[in-house]
Image (cartoon, rainbow, N blue to C red):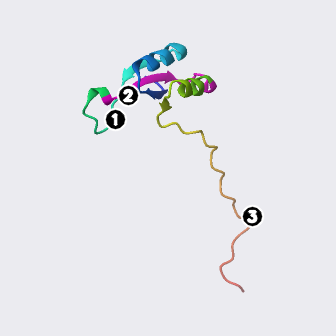
Amino acid sequence: MGEALVAYFFEREDAESVAAEVAGDVRRGRFHGEDDDEDHPWMVLVPTGTDRTLLDGLLSRFDGWLEGVQEPRPPPRPASLPTGPRRLKKG
């Protein structure tokens, strides 16, 4: 499937509207512990190349949310190395 963001919506019509805007795929989501099919949200698989400003606006308008989105963090800086030998004994 490749990398995709997952957006959730409570109403099917909202999910279909967003999917049409971002060329996404609508599916039925499941929450853990939910037995009633009517309580499951609608998922939209959003391609990662989608404009985040557009997506954020659609999520706000249709009361949706993204699952597990983490902002990319910069790589950690390497530890600084000593410039000379370390002396264990004074002598």
Task: Tell me the element at label 3.
Answer: loop
Of 82 and 74, the residue lying toward us: 74
Disc 3: which residue: 83
Disc 1: which residue: 31
Q: CA distance from mark 1 to mark 3?
A: 55 Å
Residue 50 position by quadrant: top right
Residue 73 shown left or right of residue 8 in the figure: right
Disc 3 or disc 2, which is closer to the eye?
Answer: 2
The region drawn magenta spans 39-53
Q: CA distance from mark 2 to mark 1?
A: 8 Å
Residue 79 position by quadrant: bottom right
Contact? badges 1 and 3 (CB < 8 Å): no
Tell me the kind of residue under disc 2: Pro
Tell me the kind of residue under disc 3: Thr
- For disc 2, the neighbor class at 10 Å (few under 14, some 14 to 19, many from 20) is many
6 falls in the magenta region: no
Q: Residue at x 49, y 32 (%)?
A: 66
Q: Earlier in the sequence, mark 1 or mark 3?
A: 1
42 falls in the magenta region: yes
Tell me the kind of residue under disc 1: Phe
- Residue 74 x %, y %: 64, 43
Residue 74 shown left or right of residue 66 in the figure: right
Contact? badges 2 and 1 (CB < 8 Å): yes
- For disc 3, the neighbor class at 10 Å (few under 14, some 14 to 19, many from 20) is few
Q: Residue at x 63, y 45 (%)?
A: 75
Q: Residue at x 41, y 25 (%)?
A: 43
Residue 49 shown left or right of residue 64 in the figure: right
**Vertical order, 90 against 66 (above or below):** below
Q: Earlier in the sequence, mark 3 or mark 2?
A: 2
Residue 30 position by quadrant: top left
Question: Which numbered dot is residue 41?
Answer: 2
Task: Tell me the element at label 1.
Answer: loop
